[in-house]
Image (cartoon, rainbow, N blue to C red):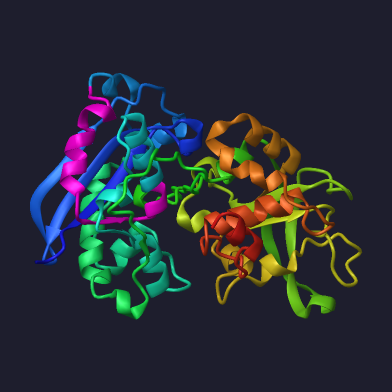
Amino acid sequence: METRQIFIDTETTGLSVRQGHRIVEIAALEATGGRLTGRKFHAYLNPERNIDQGAQQVHGLTTSFLRGHPKFSEIAQEFISFVRGAECLMHNAPFDVSFIDAELERAGHRIQLADISDRITCTLKLARKHYPGESASLDALMQRAGLNFTRQNHSAMGDTRLLSEVYFRLLKGLSAESGLVDSMPTNRGRIPARAPMATTSPMFSRKDGSSSSDFEVRPSLIPLAAKFAERYITILRAHPTKTYNYATRGYFDFPVFEIEQHGQKCRQGESWLYFAIPEDASPYTLKAQERLYVGAQTQDRMFRGDGMGGTNFHHAEMRAGCGNDTPLSFLKEGKRIVIYRADAESIAAQIRKDDSFAQLRVLELQPRTPKKHLGWWLEQYVLFSEPSQWRWNTASADKALTQLFA
């Protein structure tokens, strides 16, 4: 008899189960033999608490709408019966599992999802192993699978359907024998004395343009940084003839950029996060092609250049760009580049106050060196949470971030 497969997704009130956030929507679709059977489980839930603004913007569910819906305890047994004995597939399973287990505990059920499942498979990890170095978000997988679908708000049921489509088109052929199925162990055959609450808060990032089922859901830092950011430099154009060399970094004959500088240069000891975006873009709602470059600094290395007296904006790594996509090619299209900078300490202070960013508080606790200052840790988090999205960043996040948020 073929194992039943159940695709599961959730929407929640916020990012952290440890902060008491709850499920507001849960959906599950059954499949056997590589096809959906038509059997489904779906419920909107009264979370008995407020919804964080960021989460509400993603899924569009409001406290007033959910107030008239059942609590998880009222649908728990039906959900248990639906998934019992099946392989449960989720895109970033640790996130959904932690919330489901917490809800089962609150409802008085002395079991976890792993106790009633045949196995739990994380399709996000599966996709990352199968497509190393490429985006494993649900949107990226949809595009790879040839699914042309655009959503306004995310929904558990909608994302579950899309996940099943992606799985059957792209991932179904990957077997456990190939080492590409990343399944979580189950505890069938025993009932724990008490189902423990999650002790860690899985990272959770809805990147701009990505699916809620990319559910690592890691909060985007740039919109938060934008609250404290100042317009620092506007790059207007490239000088038609002037060039300079930055021989110590191996860069030669770079065109001189004409700029407008809006603020004083950064001083030694100050820690800044900065990011470059098109002049007409909003840092609060960046689109994929508007993420140009992100960096950090403790003193102004933007204004250096061999023989230029420290007046030429260069920033060698950013200006080198990636292939034919460079600031020079961007400027030749008649566009301008704006570099914003935000004080790292101000960003950290807001993170300490805002529970939506509770997972990021660990960044402030990391060891500091002249290179790995607070702004650097924030920069690395952006590169980690939005991999391959910043057009002119050629290096991935430091491995310390991977270990920190694994």
Q: Is residue 177 magenta?
A: no
Percent coordinates x, y for residue 378 in the rendering: 67, 50
Q: Is residue 315 left or right of residue 214?
A: right
Q: Nearer the viewer, residue 296 or 21?
A: 21
Query: Residue sitting at 54 percent across and 63 percent down?
Result: 333
Query: Residue sitting at 55 percent across and 75 percent down?
Result: 324
Up-down relation of residue 343 to residue 386 (above or below) = above
Residue 248, quarter of picture: bottom right
Residue 118, quarter of picture: bottom left
Q: Is residue 79 magenta?
A: yes
Query: Residue sitting at 85 percent across and 53 percent down?
Result: 299
Q: Nearer the viewer, residue 109 or 148?
A: 109
Q: Nearer the viewer, residue 155 or 279?
A: 155
The magenta span reads 69-95
Percent coordinates x, y for residue 110 in the rendering: 32, 38
The quarter of the rendered structure image containing the N terminus is bottom left
Up-down relation of residue 361 to residue 252 (above or below) = above
Query: Residue sitting at 36 percent across and 46 percent down?
Result: 96
Q: How many marks?
A: 0
Percent coordinates x, y for residue 335 in the rendering: 57, 57
The quarter of the rendered structure image containing the C terminus is bottom right
Residue 41, quarter of picture: top left
- The answer to whether any part of residue 341 appears in the image is no
- The answer to whether any part of residue 105 appears in the image is yes
Q: Nearer the viewer, residue 160 or 334?
A: 160
